[in-house]
Image (spheres, helix red, strand yellow):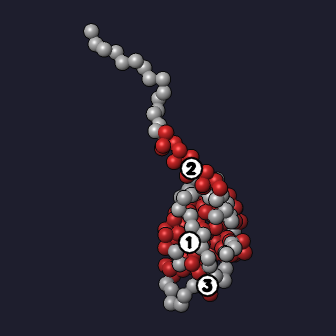
Amino acid sequence: MFYKRPKRKFLFYFNKNYLQRAMLRWSTLKKNKTTFAFIKKCSSLTEVLTDHNLASLGDTYINFAYSLALSNRRGKPSGTKVKGSVLAEALKKAELRRHLPARMTRHMLADAAEALIVYAWLHNYITLEESVATLEKTDDPIEGFSQLLATIKNRVKFF
């Protein structure tokens, strides 16, 4: 006859210290009113625009928001990528070029636009819904992104 193990009453076993650390981390995030642990507050617009880590996250965010806007406009799901030249022109049109160093390529300007947009979203200056609505308003993506960047420029505050 085989020994039959009794059924456990709890499906998951959590270490008490693990739960305490998780609760402490969550309460710290709640206290600071941030959702993400990697967020840092920047002291100037130039610092945000030249942050390469924000730019890499911003690339994904911008493509997602623009794809949602196109999907709403067309009435069916569609995914697309935003060209760097579109973002570079939108950055210039929103009069943000003067906050960047001289001799920057279109790719660098596009990265700056991506960094600023995702920084504004991470710090709750704009919402995803607001980004999509702004991009939906116009047929020209340069105009939509320049309006979004201008809105962000007016809302973002630095210490």
- Which is in the foreground here, disc 2 or disc 1? 2
Q: Is residue 77 above or below residue 118?
A: above
Q: Nearer the viewer, residue 42 or 100?
A: 42
Residue 87 found in image quarter = bottom right
Q: CA distance from mark 3 to mark 1?
A: 13 Å
Q: CA distance from mark 2 to mark 1?
A: 30 Å
Q: Secondary structure at mark 2?
A: helix
**For the residue carrying disc 1, how many other residues have a C-alpha within 10 Å: few (<14), some (14-19), or many (20+)?**
many
Residue 10, disc: none
Amino acid type at mark 3:
His
| Secondary structure state at the residue bearing disc 1 | helix
**Position of 147 compared to 109: left or right?**
right
Residue identified by numbered label 2: 24
The answer to whether 92 appears left or right of 84 in the picture is right
| Figure quadrant of the C terminus | bottom right
Residue that carries the numbered disc 3 in the rendered image: 99
Task: Give the percent coordinates (x, y) of residue 156.
Answer: 68, 72
Q: What is the distance, in whole Å, between disc 3 and disc 2 at their CAs?
A: 38 Å
